[in-house]
Image (tube, rainbow, N blue to C red):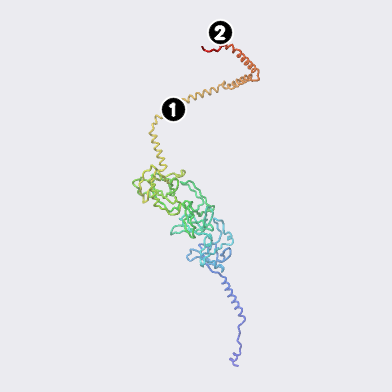
Amino acid sequence: MSDPQRAERRPQRSLSPIWIVPLVALLIGAWMIYDNLSKLGPSITLIMDNAEGIEAGKTLIKTRNVEVGRVEKVRLSDDLEHAEITARMSPQAEDMLNEDTRFWVVKPRIGREGVSGLGTVLSGAYIQLLPGSSEQAQEIFDVLEQPPVAPPDAEGLRINLISQVGNAISTGDPVTYQGYTVGRVEDSHFDPEKREMRHRLYIQSPYEVLVTSTTRFWTASGIDMRLDSEGFRVNVASFESLIGGGITFGVPENASMGRQAKEGANYVLFNDEDSAKEGRYGQYLEYVMLVDDTVRGLSPGAPVEYRGVRIGTVVSVPWNFTAPQPDSLSRFAIPVLIRIEPQRFDDTEQDVDTEQWQQRLERMFDHGLRASLKAGNLLTGALFVDLNFYKEAVPFQRMTFVKKQVFPTTSGGFAQIEQKVSNLLDKLNKLQIEPVLDTLNQTLASTQQTMDKVNGIATSVDALLADPATGQLPENVNTTMRQLRDTLQGFAPDSQGYGELTQTLSRLEKLMRDLQPVIRTLNDQPNALIFDKKLTEDPQPRARK
């Protein structure tokens, strides 16, 4: 049989069963790869200034203490300015990754609110995720240095503050209202172009109603001690502010509550409460006082008062001291710049007519309104500007100093006292002192003689008191009194002497009655004792012929 025939008769070989095993293994591997890939979440990049405590393959990403990712790679950026962390998130975390999502590292921290993150001492640091509410997805995030104050969608109010450099305000500082914490500082950064600090505040609900268009914010320094022309004042903020400072706010006294603040509204952060109150007087009239008295003790910020009511503020002491002064005044006066703030009278945020107020002040100048420096605090020597009317004021001629209207002045209290003392000394110098001194010498001589006599009398009295007989005088007086008492006892109503005296007086009375006829006879006839008494008949009444 030929070879082709043999080939036609040979049966064809089928697939060997042994290939089933690798095929199944291949399918299982593909399924496992698919399963692993389907369970893998998105990959994100985290930017950090310092990757301290972060380890690839170990550091977890959590939210509400549930693992939602793991760090896969830690490396430096190309410019070597920060660290880049690559993390693999779980599929369930994909919806959490948007532009509002926040990340921060949880590790042991010691702050104003106490110690936090102690659980990471043994387990190590981890990255906390705070989901956002935005619909815009994001894959690259900046890791915060501090935990956020509140979620971006938290109920409340967020506003912006602008302050000058020097306010020691940082993220997490409390925001208080009348000593009660109602919010926190979310962010603080410096704007180098405008040279100012910008702070973002979060006021938690329901306290956002406290922030209105007339609200003023100022730094809470814990303890504010001040000794100035208005006296000694101490303001103490909350205990937390006492330790680390913070921000407080309120509506100025007698001001309207204003409208409810809007989200993202801008406010100015003042250094203290007084500056916050003064900051609302945005309309004012500027005047220059040319003071001939000393300005020691007068400082910027001192009040300008009218009969005890503050109506303005001292701005600068001195102001443009080297500028030429009007010829009608002293060329060596000290220029002081002041502001008259008409809004203080009405205590309102509305605009005022400054021109009308300027005309009113000029009329008051003609009626004797003058400014003077007076002591507000004798302990510190602080001065303030006092405005009042003086009937004998010299007429004021309107003038300007460096394009500012001049406010008429008069001598202050100390200068007036000095003038009065000088006038008193002049009057004393004109007095005739020598006659007065001569009379005074004579009076002193007479007084000396009187005192000598008084001393002599005192010496005599001392000698009399030292005499032994004077010492026995009380005993003699006592003896005499006893004898007198014994004598008087003999004339008591129940004594014998009293009875005898009574009988004698009765006999004497009887004798007097018996002697009365004899006495009448002698009165009628004195010689009746020698001659017999003439008997006369009784007279008979008769009629005249």
| Closer-to-camera residue (149/368) | 368
Identified by mark 2, the residue type is Asn
Residue 120's label in the rendered image is none
Q: Position of residue 127 (x, y in %)?
A: 55, 63
Identified by mark 1, the residue type is Thr
Residue 527's label in the rendered image is 2
Residue 59 appears in the picture as rendered: no
Quadrant in the rendering for residue 53: bottom right
The Cα atoms of the two marked residues, 1 and 2, are separated by: 79 Å
Instruction: For mark 2, give the secondary structure.
Output: helix
Q: Can you say whether 324 is above or below 59 in the image?
A: above
Numbered disc in front, either 1 or 2: 2
Q: In which quadrant is the N terminus drawn?
A: bottom right
What residue occupies the far front of the structure in this picture? 545
Q: Position of residue 367 (x, y in %)?
A: 38, 45
Residue 443's label in the rendered image is 1
Q: Can you say whether 234 is above or below 155 in the image?
A: above
What residue occupies the far left of the structure in this picture? 327
